[in-house]
Image (spheres, rainbow, N blue to C red):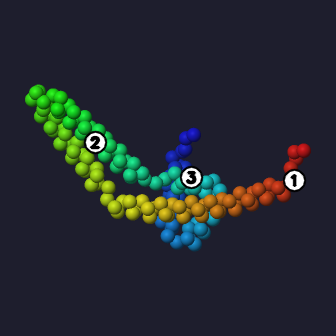
Amino acid sequence: METSKLELTKLAQLVTFLENDSSDIKTMLYNLNQLSTEELESVQSYFSGSGFRTFSKTFLQISMASFISGMTVFFFVKFQAELLVFFLGIAYLLACILIFFRSTLKAPTKSFLEIAINRGKYDRIISLTAIILDERYREDFQNALETPSDFK
């Protein structure tokens, strides 16, 4: 299913608007009540699936650098007699070690705190959206029960 650029732009504006108001619950609840059911469903699905996975990305970099460094050491030991392979192996080993240390030192605590704060905002938006959607679904269900149907 493809989404048009106009719908994506509207969702982006809606998401940034809700993120800015997430510190004040009364304002956010008022703004969420103003949205249609479809908009609430899209907001809930967006915030349920969002969130950065910094740890997995950093762990992937570390594991890749460790594997490549290990392979470099293996080839360095195996082909020590070749002068060109020796120097290429040393250069590659140093590059891998540099990448390894850069990726371990790159993940600052501040970004993890920002992720936790944003996750708290997202959870607040998701919970309020779920409450509003439950009320609307209950009202729709009650209205559907009260209206007579033509099916027998």
Q: Are marks 2 and 3 in contact (CB under 8 Å)?
A: no
Of the two numbered discs 2 and 1 on the same chain, state the one appearing first in sequence. 2
Q: Position of residue 38 (x, y in %)?
A: 63, 53
Q: Looking at the figure, which quarter contains the N terminus?
A: top right
Residue type highlighted by circle 2: Ser
Residue type highlighted by circle 3: Ser
The Cα–Cα distance between marks 1 and 3, rounded to whole angstroms, is 33 Å
Residue 19 visible, this angle: no
Q: Position of residue 96 (x, y in %)?
A: 23, 42
- Tell me which corner region of the image, top left, top right, bottom left or bottom right, holds residue 29: bottom right
Horizontal side of residue 29 vs 72, given as left or right: right
Residue type highlighted by circle 1: Pro
Horizontal side of residue 17 vs 29, given as left or right: left
Horizontal side of residue 27 vs 148, given as left or right: left
> Which residue was labeled with disc 2?
66
> Which residue was labeled with disc 3?
45
Viewer-nearest of discs 2 and 1: 2
Q: Residue at x 21, y 33 (%)?
A: 74
Q: Secondary structure at mark 2?
A: helix
> Which is more toward the observer, 109 or 70?
70
Of the two numbered discs 2 and 3 on the same chain, state the one appearing first in sequence. 3
> Which residue was labeled with disc 1?
148
Label 3 Cα neighbours within 10 Å, binned few <14 / some 14-19 / many ≥20: few
- Tell me which corner region of the image, top left, top right, bottom left or bottom right, holds residue 64: top left
Q: Position of residue 36 (x, y in %)?
A: 64, 58
Label 1 Cα neighbours within 10 Å, binned few <14 / some 14-19 / many ≥20: few
Q: Looking at the figure, which quarter contains the C terminus?
A: top right
Q: Position of residue 9 (x, y in %)?
A: 50, 52
